[in-house]
Structure formats: structure tokens, C-alpha cells
Amino acid sequence: MKINHCSFPEDILYDIENFVWSKTNSGERIITIGIISCLGYISGKLSNINLKPVGIAVERGKSLGTIESSRYFGVVRSPVSGEIVEVNSSLSHNPVLANQHPYTQGWFAKLRATKIGDEVKNLQNIKSCSDDMAALIQRHHIICFDSFPDYELFQVGVECAATLAKLDELLEKIAVGNVVHLVSDDPTADLEMIRWAEQTGQSLLDTRREENLFHFTIEKTQK
């Protein structure tokens, strides 16, 4: 299901209050847990994830570990009680997986649940909590894109010509394949970005408007 351009799988359960999801293996008490995509956009590109080790018992609402970016530090809280039986070791050396693939490769931990009957009742599928999820997206001004940005460039109150010059400078420094999220309030920004992309050969992936702000995602495709 998509809510305000943000995608939410329908085969998992959500704990909106704690920004986490869970999925139960059929016929087992093993529950996979990760963060919802909204938290990845609030935090920005994650630089560090520390998870508690296998064998630790965790109560519902208590910490599974922490996440950190250049602008955010937070605790990831478990939606259920149980013993950690596996953690995603890939996150320690590639934390951005939690931003890019929050519901697949970016999962955090697997727990053997101890109170699954009572606690799963507190979780909801996306159809049941869609209104609450939409309110969360609006409250935090979350803008979801198909490709999670590696860099952000906020150019509010700046003329488009100066914005494009800064964008060119940034693109010179980053690798091919990286994605930039650009924000501008120049009223001609949408037309100027189309012209700029045609001239430079860089890929304009997405354009959104939120009140007086334009949001663009640009992939560096040319050296």
C-alpha cells in the first residue's frame, strides 16, 4: 500500500508509536523486526547501527539497539518481548541498508517471542493503521522517494541559478549512482531542473511539490 508516496508492505505488522515493524514466521515464534521507512527519512542517511547481541532478553518497548546519522540519534524499541536469536550483521558495515531496504535486507533482529499472543494484538496491519500512518507522515513532513537519497541540498531563499551551481559542485565530488535530494522554493525550479537535466545528462528521478517547496531527486549518471 502507498500512503503519500510512501510504500508499506501489507504482509507485516506495524508499531507506529515506536516506528518499527514485525513479521512472524508461519508456525513459529520467531519474529523479524525492523524500522519503518518513515524513520529512515526522519533520521537521514544512517551512519551507525548498534544492535544488542544474540541471547539477550528484551521486553516489549525496550531497546534492541541504536541508530545514528549526522543529524539523529535514537533507540530502536522492540514491539514484542523475547530473546534475540539473530541480528543482521550486514547493518554494522552497511547501515544505509536500513534506509534503502527497510523491509527486506535492512531488517534488524529476530526474536523468539515469549508473549506473542498478548503483544501481537497491539500491532496492526497497514490497512488498519493507514490513517495513523498518514498522520505521522504529515506531522513529520516526510517526503518518500523511490530511491533513498545519499545527499541532501537545501536551497531555500536561493535563486535557481545559484542552486544549480551548488548542485554541479556537489555532483563533481560524489560517485556515479549516488542520489541527491534537492529542495528549492524558487518558483521556476521545476522548469529549470528539467532544462538542467537535459543539458547535463544527469537523471532527474522525481519531482514533488509541498506547498511552496519543490523536492527533486537527482541521480548522478554522468562523470
Image (cartoon, rainbow, N blue to C red):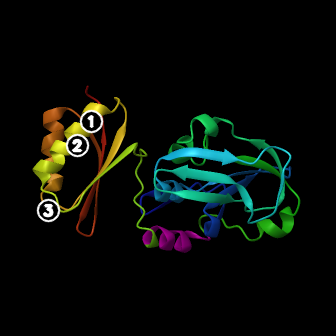
In the rendered structure, find residue 87 and report the number of the disc placed on it.
Answer: none
Residue beneath the point at 52% across and 42% down: 96
Compared across the picture, whether 102 is left or right of 64 comes to: left
Q: Main secondary structure of the magenta part?
A: helix
Query: Closer to the camera, 148 or 174?
Result: 174
Which of labels 3 and 1 is toward the front?
1
| Residue drawn at (78%, 62%) of the image | 80
Q: Nearer the viewer, mark 3 or mark 2?
A: 2
The amino acid pointed to by label 1 is Leu
Verify CB contact (< 8 Å) between mark 2 and mark 1: yes
The residue wearing badge 2 is: 167
**Type of amino acid at the residue the image marks with label 2:** Leu
Residue 109 included in the magenta stretch of the image: no
Give the extent of the magenta segment: 128-138
| Percent position of residue 137, x then y | 46, 67
- Residue occupying the point 45% across, 73% down: 139
Q: Which residue is mark 1?
A: 171
Q: Which residue in the protein does label 3 denote?
A: 187
Quadrant in which the C terminus appears: top left
x and y, in percent, of residue 41 in the image = 47, 56
Relative placement, left or right, of 143 versus 12 is left
Q: Residue furthest top?
A: 223
- For residue 25, say whether it is visible: no
Give the Cα separation between the discs numbered 2 and 1. Answer: 6 Å
Residue pictured at 42% horizontal, 47% vertical:
146
What is the x, y in percent for residue 204? 26, 42
Q: Residues within 10 Å of mark 3 (few under 14, many from 20)?
A: few
Q: Is residue 175 visible in the rendered structure shown here?
A: yes
Sequence-first disc among 3 and 1: 1
